[in-house]
């Protein structure tokens, strides 16, 4: 029996987030440059996005490029930006065909103008799609996001639009780049690393986490189904006891 056959269609997670790690190591294992791994990783994104849409997952957030990634060699950064533009250009028709809506979170002001423009075009073109919401985290980090949220809250307080008494978890959530997006039910990280690398620190408070040694270019749809099955066997208590959850 395949993992797909074991999936309970009544317990599909609403939101899955993925840290797509291991492209560089995969390329090194194959005696190739890092960009070869990133290009192979794009195909994995295509496959997993298609599977998520078919499964009925509503949100799929992919950690594509962190604020720390700007510190990589300029040659690699430039190549990654070019690959992003190329991928969006090629994948937009597929997104439209599959009713997928593209969204982004992160400091897009740091992206090259050509890259940012291409993403804005795709976001506008897919904005009316009603299927899977694919959220790309670009130039993103949680510390940047939370800092920006606090800055915006302080600015509104200075303008008399916000008081200390009005600040609570819901208020702060509205200032995050993920405002309006439900928190992830499941976080998947590939490549054998056991950390969340400054990704969705606020939003992952009660997410289930799944780590696999599989490098991202080798992460197949069946691996994805395996993660979903593992998630479905967990008991999500959100601070309650097992008895409270089953009542």
Image (cartoon, rainbow, N blue to C red):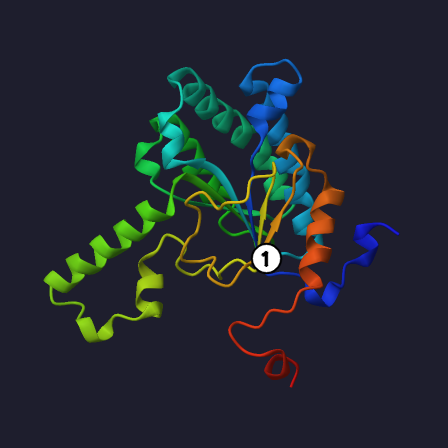
- Left or right? Give the position of 22 relative to 150: right
Which quadrant of the view contains residue 162? Answer: bottom left
SS class, disc 1: loop
- Name the residue tied to disc 1: 58
Give the percent coordinates (x, y) of residue 11: 69, 66
Q: Quadrant of the C terminus?
A: bottom right
Query: In this rendering, does residue 38 appear at all?
Result: no
| Residue name at image x 46 percent, y 19 percent | 79
Give the percent coordinates (x, y) of residue 85: 48, 27
Which quadrant of the view contains residue 39? Answer: top right
Give the percent coordinates (x, y) of residue 216: 62, 34
- Classify 10 Å Cα crowding around label 1: few (below 14), some (14-19), many (20 and above): many
Vertical position of residue 127 compared to residue 235: above or below:
above
- Left or right? Give the position of 167 relative to 234: left
| Residue name at image x 59 percent, y 25 percent | 25
Query: In this rendering, does residue 108 appear at all?
Result: yes
Total numbered labels placed on residues in the image: 1
- Left or right? Give the position of 199 relative to 7: left
| Residue name at image x 51 percent, y 74 percent | 239
Vertical position of residue 37 compared to residue 97: above or below:
above
Which quadrant of the view contains residue 198? Answer: top left
Give the percent coordinates (x, y) of residue 41: 61, 30
Q: Residue furthest bottom?
A: 247
């Amino acid at each position: 029996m395949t993992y797909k056959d074991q999936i309970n269609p009544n317990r599909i997670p609403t939101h899955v987030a993925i840290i797509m790690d291991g492209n560089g190591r995969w390329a090194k294992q194959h005696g190739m440059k890092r960009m070869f791994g990133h290009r192979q990783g794009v195909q994995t994104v295509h496959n997993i996005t298609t599977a998520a849409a078919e499964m009925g997952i509503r949100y799929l957030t992919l950690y594509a490029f962190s604020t720390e990634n700007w510190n990589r060699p300029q040659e690699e950064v430039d190549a990654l930006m070019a690959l992003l533009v190329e991928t969006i250009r090629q994948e937009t028709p597929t997104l439209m065909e599959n009713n997928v809506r593209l969204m982004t979170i992160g400091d897009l002001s740091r992206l090259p103008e050509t890259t940012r423009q291409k993403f804005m075009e795709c976001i506008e073109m897919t904005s009316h799609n009603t299927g899977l919401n694919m959220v790309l985290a670009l130039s993103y980090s949680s510390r940047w996001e939370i800092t920006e949220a606090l800055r915006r809250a302080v600015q509104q307080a200075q303008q008399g639009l916000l008081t200390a008494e009005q600040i609570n978890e819901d208020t702060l959530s509205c200032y995050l780049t993920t405002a309006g997006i439900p928190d992830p039910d499941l976080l998947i990280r590939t490549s054998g690393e056991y950390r969340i690398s400054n990704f969705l620190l606020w939003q992952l408070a009660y997410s289930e986490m799944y780590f696999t040694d599989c490098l991202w270019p080798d992460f197949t749809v069946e691996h994805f189904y395996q993660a979903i099955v593992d998630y479905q066997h967990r008991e999500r208590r959100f601070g309650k006891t097992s008895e409270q959850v089953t009542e």
